[in-house]
């Protein structure tokens, strides 16, 4: 058997190199997966720009975290997977033992184990992720669609956490991959979705994915004005989900909701940023403020089920394909705000 593989290694800001490195050795409970598709993601783009991610990846490191593939080898003691199995392995797994895990809030686990290295020919899936967050992909689901499980789990989590009811009007701020996914999930759940986006390419995508209304603007004031005008007596929406991750749009979300409405600060802002909120409005209008981070094993299973159901238009999220060798070029293109949603990197 071959002993080396091609893999993308992140060295720092806008510095990723393709290298031949040894295929990782397996420990007990681990899996070796041959990657069939790895998807680009907003988080990876952020990492490419900044050169690191405080929680997820510290260079030099293998790069990429949304993947699906086939099992090549199973480590000692693995009972649920065998060579040839089609799998999606999530990018993390909780410990199962801490305060948060015991309360079903595994997304907040004190010891979340992250795994990177999806932009490669092979990846080692550590035992904990094999045990908790590696799922069999049904035969009829293309592996590149299954690779959407991780971001979709975040989207489903954010939507469900906003406590929606069918028929609710839901405003989603941001037309990036995750904003579009939440939008699609909300539309499939029977909500009336108002998408607030910036770029031309996002308008068409939002419509195709089920937005009832699309507000295209770069002005926060205009977005609030136009979105409110779409609700009875301009009262505001039932739920506003912020999927951009800047303080200005966090504040916008609060101004979009009606009395008794719910805001979800889904987009994570840069460290050290703050927002100013109108305390009177929040109190006397009885507004619920929530924030959702990451996913839990149960939500990941729901996400894959949704993809497998065929209701979720997975194909619409993968707007390009490229070989591993083209990774740098793909990220440069994504930095220039192309209309791509996700590119499938195929080794
Ligand atoms: Zn991602
Ligand atoms: Zn834990």
Image (cartoon, rainbow, N blue to C red):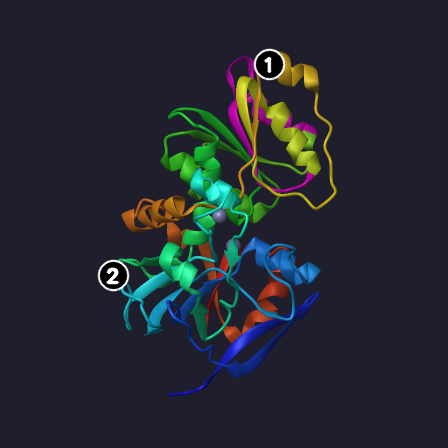
Ligand 1 within 8 A of label 1's CB? no
- Which numbered tag is attached to residue 270? none
Q: Position of residue 170 (x, y in %)?
A: 49, 29
Closer-to-camera residue (163/191)? 163
**Observer able to see residue 206:** no
Which corner quadrant holds the C terminus?
A: bottom left
- Which numbered tag is attached to residue 139? 2
Closer-to-camera residue (126/298)? 126
The answer to which image quadrant residue 285 occupies is top right
The answer to which image quadrant residue 47 occupies is bottom right
Closer-to-camera residue (128/244)? 128
Can residue 226 be found in the magenta stretch?
yes
Magenta stretch, residue numbers: 221-246
Give the mark nearer the N terminus: 1 vs 2. Answer: 2
- Residue labelled with disc 1: 285
Q: Element type at marker 2? A: loop
């Amino acid at each position: 058997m071959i002993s080396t593989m091609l893999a993308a290694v992140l060295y720092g800001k806008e510095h990723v190199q393709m290298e031949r490195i040894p295929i990782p050795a397996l420990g007990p409970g681990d899996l070796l997966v041959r990657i069939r598709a790895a998807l680009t993601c907003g988080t990876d783009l952020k990492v490419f720009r900044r050169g690191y991610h405080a929680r997820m990846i510290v260079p030099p490191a293998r790069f990429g975290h949304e993947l699906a593939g086939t099992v090549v080898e199973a480590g000692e003691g693995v009972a649920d997977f065998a060579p040839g199995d089609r799998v999606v392995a999530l990018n993390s797994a909780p410990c199962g033992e801490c305060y948060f895990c015991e309360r079903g809030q595994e997304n907040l686990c004190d010891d979340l184990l992250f795994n990177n290295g999806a932009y490669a020919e092979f990846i080692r899936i550590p035992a904990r992720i094999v045990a908790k967050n590696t799922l069999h992909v049904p035969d009829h689901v293309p592996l590149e669609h299954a690779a959407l499980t991780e971001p979709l789990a975040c989207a489903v989590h954010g939507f469900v956490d906003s406590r929606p009811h069918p028929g609710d009007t839901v405003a989603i701020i941001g037309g990036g991959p995750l904003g579009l996914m939440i939008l699609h999930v909300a539309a499939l759940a029977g909500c009336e979705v108002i998408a607030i986006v910036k770029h031309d390419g996002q308008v068409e995508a939002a419509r195709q994915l089920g937005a009832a209304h699309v507000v295209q603007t770069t002005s926060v004031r205009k977005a609030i004005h136009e979105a409110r005008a779409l609700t009875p007596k301009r009262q505001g929406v039932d739920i506003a989900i912020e999927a951009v991750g800047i303080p200005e749009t966090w504040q916008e979300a609060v101004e979009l909701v009606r009395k008794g409405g719910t805001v979800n600060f889904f987009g994570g802002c840069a460290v050290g940023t703050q927002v100013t909120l109108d305390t009177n409005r929040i109190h006397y209008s009885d507004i619920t403020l929530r924030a959702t981070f990451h996913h839990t094993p149960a939500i990941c299973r729901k996400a894959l089920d949704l993809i497998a159901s065929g209701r979720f238009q997975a194909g619409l999220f993968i707007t390009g394909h490229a070989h591993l060798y083209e990774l740098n070029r793909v990220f440069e293109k994504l930095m220039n705000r192309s209309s791509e949603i996700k590119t499938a990197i195929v080794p």
